Image (cartoon, rainbow, N blue to C red):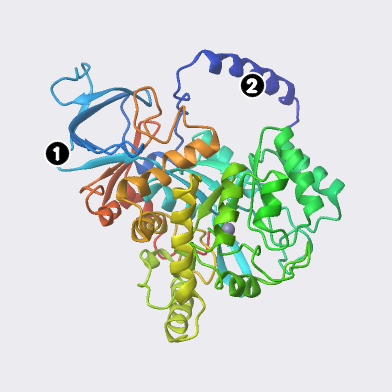
C-alpha cells in the first residue's frame, strides 16, 4: 500500500490527544479483534461483582462482601454489597468467597526466553498470553533483543489485534561491547544519545542500560531519555549503583545482586565480572554500614530497585521446582530440568547465602523509604515461566518478610507509581481502569492463593486464564 495515509493518521492522533484530555481516567477500550475474542468470557459494558473481598493494592486491609461495578472499562462504583446500586442491565457475578486484587504491574518482564546455549528466542505470541493468564495487566519489557518486536507487540495489544497486558516497551539494550549476538555496541556518548533518540522515535517508551556501558554513555542516555519524558533503568556492572544514582538513573534491576559497589579497587567503567561482584556482595550484609550508606544514597536520589527473586531462585539449591513448566516445548522443559538438577547438586553455590542476603537487603531498602518494584526476568537457565513466575514473585516477597498486603502493593501500585500511571491503574479505586484479578481464596491471609486465578479483567473485559494457558501449552519456546 502506498504511504499516503501517513499525514491523515498524524492529524487523527493530534485530535485524539485533545479528546483524551477531556476523557475520564479510563482509556477508551479498543475493539477486540478475532485473535483476542476466543479468550474473552466477560464482555458486557456493565458488570457488577458482588459479595467479593476487595484487596485494593494500597496496603489497606481487605474489605469483605463488597460490590464493584464496572462500566465501560472503568470502576464506576464500589462499596458494601447492599449499599451499592446495581445499574439495570448489568451482568451480575456473585463472587462470594473470592477476592479481587488489582491487575499486577510487573516491571522486569521479557518477550524472549533462553531457547538454547546463549540464544534467546522471541515469544511474542505465547508470553503475552501467559502474563495475562497469571494476572499481569501491565508490564515493562526490561530489555529487548528483538529490535522492533516489543514495540510492535505493544501496539498490536493496544489496538485490540493481539491479546496480552499493556506493555511499556523497552528499546534495545543500551550497552557497550558484549558477547550477546543481538545487542548493539555503543561507540561513545554521542552514539548513546543518538541510539536513545532513534528508538524513542520508533516508539520505545522505556530504556534499559546494560553491563558494559560507560559512565559517559549512561549519562548521555539518561539525559536523552529524560528530555523525552522517558525513564531508564539498568542491569549494571561496569557502572556502580552509586555512580548510576549520581547520574540520575531511575531504577536498578535485580535487587542488589548485580551491584559492583563493594568490589575492592573497582576499575571505573569496567565490569569486573558478575561473579566478582557477587563475591564482594557476599562480604556485606543488610546491616553493614557500607550497605546502609548506599541505600541512603539511592533513596535520596529517588532511585527505585526492582526485585527479580524468581530468576535467582532457579539458581539457588533447595528451592522447589518452578510451576508452569508444562507450557514449555518438551525439549526446553527437559533442558531446564537438567539445569535444575545440576543446581541442586552444587554444594558450593554462592546463591545459598546470596539469595537470603539479597532478600534482607530489599527489605532494608523499603524500610529506609525506597520504592521497590518487582518482576520475574524469564531468562537465566529457563524455568521462569511468565504468569506463573509473576505469582511466585509475590509469594517470594512474602517469604522475604513483607506482609501479603505489602507484597501485593509492590507488585501493583508501586509499579504503577513508577510508570506515572497511578492515576489510572495499580489500585482498585473508583474512576480507575477495571484491571482486576479474581482469585478463588484470600491472598491477604494465604499468599499462595494468588495462584488460584479464575478470571482476569483488563479494561473491564474478562479473560479466562485457562483458555490462555491451554492455547500455548507445550509450545512455549517456539513462538
Ligand atoms: Zn532481564
Residue marked by disc 2: 13
Could you tell me if residue 320 is visible in this image? yes
First in residue order: circle 1 vs circle 2: 2
Residue 122 can be seen in this image: no
Residue lying furthest front: 289
In the displayed structure image, the side of residue 101 where residue 13 appears, left or right = right
Which residue is label 1 attached to?
96
**Picture residue at 53% right of the left edge, 39% below the top:** 418
CA distance for labels 1 and 2: 43 Å
Quick one: label 1, few (<14), some, or many (20+) residues within 10 Å? some
**Residue 137 percent across, percent down from the top left:** 43, 41
Residue 405 falls in which quadrant of the image? top left
Q: Position of residue 132 (x, y in %)?
A: 41, 47
* Disc number lying in front (1 or 2): 1
Looking at the rendered structure, the secondary structure element under dot 1 is loop
Q: Could you say where residue 37 lies in the image, as x and y percent from the top left?
A: 39, 39
Amino acid at each position: 500500500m502506498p504511504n499516503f495515509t501517513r499525514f491523515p493518521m498524524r492529524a487523527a492522533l493530534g485530535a485524539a490527544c485533545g479528546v483524551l484530555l477531556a476523557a475520564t481516567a479510563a482509556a477508551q477500550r479498543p475493539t477486540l479483534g478475532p485473535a483476542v475474542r476466543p479468550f474473552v468470557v466477560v464482555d458486557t459494558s456493565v458488570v457488577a461483582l458482588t459479595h467479593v473481598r476487595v484487596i485494593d493494592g494500597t496496603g489497606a486491609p481487605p474489605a469483605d462482601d463488597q460490590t464493584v461495578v464496572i462500566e465501560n472499562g472503568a470502576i464506576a462504583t464500589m462499596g458494601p454489597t447492599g449499599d451499592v446500586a446495581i445499574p439495570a442491565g448489568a451482568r451480575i457475578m456473585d463472587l462470594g468467597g473470592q477476592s479481587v486484587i488489582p491487575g499486577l504491574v510487573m516491571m522486569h518482564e521479557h518477550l524472549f526466553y533462553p531457547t538454547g546455549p546463549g540464544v534467546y528466542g522471541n515469544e511474542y505470541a505465547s508470553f503475552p498470553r501467559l502474563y495475562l493468564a497469571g494476572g499481569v495487566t501491565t508490564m515493562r519489557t526490561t530489555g529487548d533483543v528483538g529490535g522492533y518486536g516489543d514495540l510492535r507487540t505493544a501496539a498490536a495489544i493496544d489496538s485490540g489485534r493481539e491479546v496480552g497486558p499493556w506493555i511499556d516497551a523497552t528499546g534495545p539494550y543500551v550497552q557497550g561491547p558484549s558477547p550477546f549476538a543481538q545487542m548493539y555496541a555503543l561507540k561513545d556518548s554521542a552514539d548513546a544519545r543518538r541510539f536513545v533518540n532513534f528508538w524513542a522515535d520508533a516508539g520505545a517508551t522505556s530504556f534499559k542500560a546494560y553491563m558494559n556501558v560507560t559512565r559517559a554513555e549512561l549519562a548521555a542516555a539518561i539525559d536523552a531519555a529524560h528530555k523525552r519524558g522517558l525513564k531508564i533503568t539498568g542491569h549494571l556492572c561496569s557502572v556502580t549503583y552509586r555512580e548510576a544514582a549520581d547520574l540520575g538513573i531511575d531504577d536498578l534491576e535485580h535487587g542488589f545482586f548485580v551491584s559492583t559497589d563493594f568490589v575492592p579497587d573497582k576499575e571505573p567503567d569496567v565490569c569486573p565480572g558478575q561473579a566478582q561482584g557477587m563475591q564482594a556482595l557476599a562480604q556485606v550484609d543488610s546491616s553493614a554500614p557500607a550497605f546502609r550508606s548506599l541505600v541512603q544514597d539511592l533513596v535520596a536520589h529517588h532511585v527505585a530497585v526492582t526485585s527479580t527473586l524468581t530468576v535467582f531462585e532457579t539458581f539457588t539449591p533447595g528451592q522447589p521446582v518452578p510451576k508452569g513448566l508444562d507450557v514449555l516445548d518438551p525439549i526446553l522443559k527437559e533442558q531446564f530440568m537438567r539445569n535444575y538438577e545440576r543446581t541442586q547438586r552444587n554444594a558450593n553455590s554462592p546463591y545459598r547465602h546470596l539469595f537470603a542476603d539479597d532478600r534482607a537487603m530489599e527489605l532494608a531498602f523499603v524500610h529506609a523509604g525506597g520504592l521497590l518494584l518487582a518482576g520475574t526476568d524469564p531468562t537465566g537457565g529457563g524455568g521462569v515461566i511468565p504468569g506463573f513466575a509473576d505469582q511466585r514473585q509475590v509469594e517470594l516477597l512474602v517469604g522475604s518478610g513483607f506482609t501479603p498486603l505489602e507484597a501485593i502493593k509492590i507488585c501493583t501500585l508501586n509499579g504503577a507509581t513508577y510508570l506515572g500511571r497511578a492515576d489510572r491503574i495499580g489500585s482498585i479505586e473508583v474512576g480507575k481502569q477495571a484491571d482486576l484479578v479474581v482469585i478463588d481464596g484470600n491472598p491477604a491471609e494465604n499468599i499462595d492463593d494468588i495462584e488460584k486465578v479464575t478470571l482476569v479483567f483488563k479494561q473491564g473485559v474478562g479473560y479466562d486464564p485457562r483458555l490462555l494457558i491451554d492455547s500455548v501449552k507445550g509450545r512455549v519456546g517456539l513462538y
